[in-house]
Amino acid sequence: MILELTITLVKILFIIGITVGFFAPVLTWVERKQSAIMQDRVGANRADIMGFTALGLFHAIADAIKMFTKEDFVPQGANRFLHTLSPIIAVIPAILTFAVVPFGGQYELWGTKVNLVISDLDVGLLFVFAIASIATYGYVISGWASNNNWSLLGSMRTASQMISYEVTMGLTIIGVLMVYGSMKLTEIGAAQEDFLSWGFFMQPLGFFMFLAASIAENKRIPFDAPEAESELVAGYFTEYSGLKFGMFFMAEFIEMVTIGAIVTILFFGAWHIPFLSAATILSWLDFLGANGANLVLMLIHIAVFFAKVIFFIWFQMTIRWTLPRFRYDQIMKLGWKILLPLSLANILVTGLVILAVH
Amino acid sequence: MAYFVDRPNKMTWWERSYLPEIIRGMFITSRHFFVNLFGFVPFFLGQKKERPIFTVYYPEEMVPIPVAYRGRPVLAINEHNRPNCVACGLCEAACPAYCIDIIPGENTGKQNEVERWPKEFTIDYAVCIFCGNCEEACPEEAIFMSDDYEIPMLDRKEMKFNLEQLSVPIEKLKDRVEFTRKMYGKWNY
């Protein structure tokens, strides 16, 4: 009992540490530096501590200090309570999604079964979608509570965009569910041990549609109409400053990690290495003994999983700094007229293929 | 509602799907990313002096300035450790912004080997417009536009430079002297 509790606590601490403590601050630096390198610039390198710049990594610390010490401004006529509540509603679901995301398989260490997921829900995938939809409330409330027309327009766009693309996302996932026959993220991950059974080869169209829809969910360029700088000042967080703005900012970056993790689990073989099964690695590590080999295998799997997540974060950033913003009607047209029929067709074709195979 | 423009060029179905252009754009940006990323490695290892990105890290590095550049005006000090200036006041007269202020010293006997010299020479850089008229008017090759453009201060009073602050040995201004001779020499007009 105590042992299980400790293991769960360690997993929770690990997830919170790696999302809030590592990815969120580092990604602000990565975004600046990567955009700079892609555009033949140098990028952030001015913040230094005693003459060390560490390639500009200290900008993340400077940002954090700035956000903590800035004035927390609530505009006149705004609803104070909801204005404070909405960033919390926006950021909590982003972190909460990780409760069901497995970052490794199951391992037996010293007689204890370690399952590298905080809560192995039977409806894991549904849980992800349910929690992700709650974030919409945060964005809608923030626009309404700000007493600002730009914010309200931004939040209305957010609501329509997120609802439209959630439909596509949900329908895309059905194809994956049909292929793997499970909603447990751990089982979907475990089913992709063979390279050719990766979701990418099973559902190639589904992968691209899911990626497009999830970037639209995250409201990043090219789907950033809700916060379009050139049209709406900053969209729903126009009236936010200090740590409240920081929470919206953090939510965006953590959602990027979440998208990377979900895409990795559903389509890119989760923690598996192509053409290298866990049994092969275990036989190589035989000299360490059963427990040692399992421990090393676990660490390798965690590293592989996060390497894939980092690849998808890089991919999202590349898209963000390559494509221009869609017009609002183009976003709606893409969502309802192209992605929705395509995802329905994807389900039909998947069903037919499964019927033919069996 | 959205306003649609009639475009003369008809695109094929494949082009209208927007995918080929996305792939092309992603390819170009990723190529820049990887070329620049790995181009930096030999520089940081110290094998190469030049970076692949030509951004200049300004306060630490400066771009070489062409000799025709008009920085802040300075007074040339000759090899006898005296200013070339004879306090004739031509630059003072030529200055369109009235930023030069000269108090001349005159030889009454044998205090000094030169006939006239500036007792005080003040240029107010807060007023100066960097036109170079003083340099052009000077008959004695005494005042020159240097290549120094970093003169921001927190206090305007400090921007009034006196004789010692203005003095620069003439060896440092050799290129500019050459240039002014060519530029303002009498055969040039």
Image (spheres, rainbow, N blue to C red):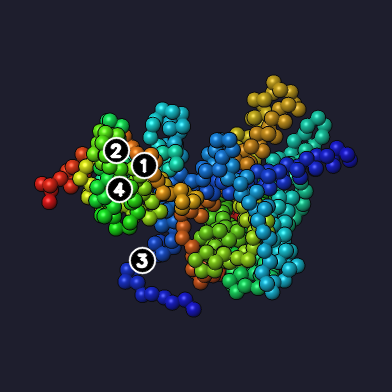
First along the sequence among labels 2 and 1? 2
Numbered circle sitting on residue B163: 1
Q: Amino acid at mark 2?
A: Pro
- The earlier-in-sequence mark between 3 and 1 is 3
Q: How many marks?
A: 4
Q: Badge 4 is on which residue? A: B70
Can you give x and y, in whole percent of width and height, for residue A100 in the image? 73, 50
Q: Chain of mark 4?
A: B
Q: How many angstroms separate mark 4 from mark 1 (CA)? A: 20 Å
Quick check: A310 left or right of B64?
right
Name the subunit of mark 2. B
**Circle 3 sits on which residue?**
B11
Q: Quadrant of the N terminus of chain A?
A: top right
Residue farthest to the left, as pictured: B187
Task: Tell me if A78 is positioned left or right of B3 in this view.
Answer: right
* Dot 2 crowding, Cα within 10 Å, few <14, some 14–19, many 20+: many
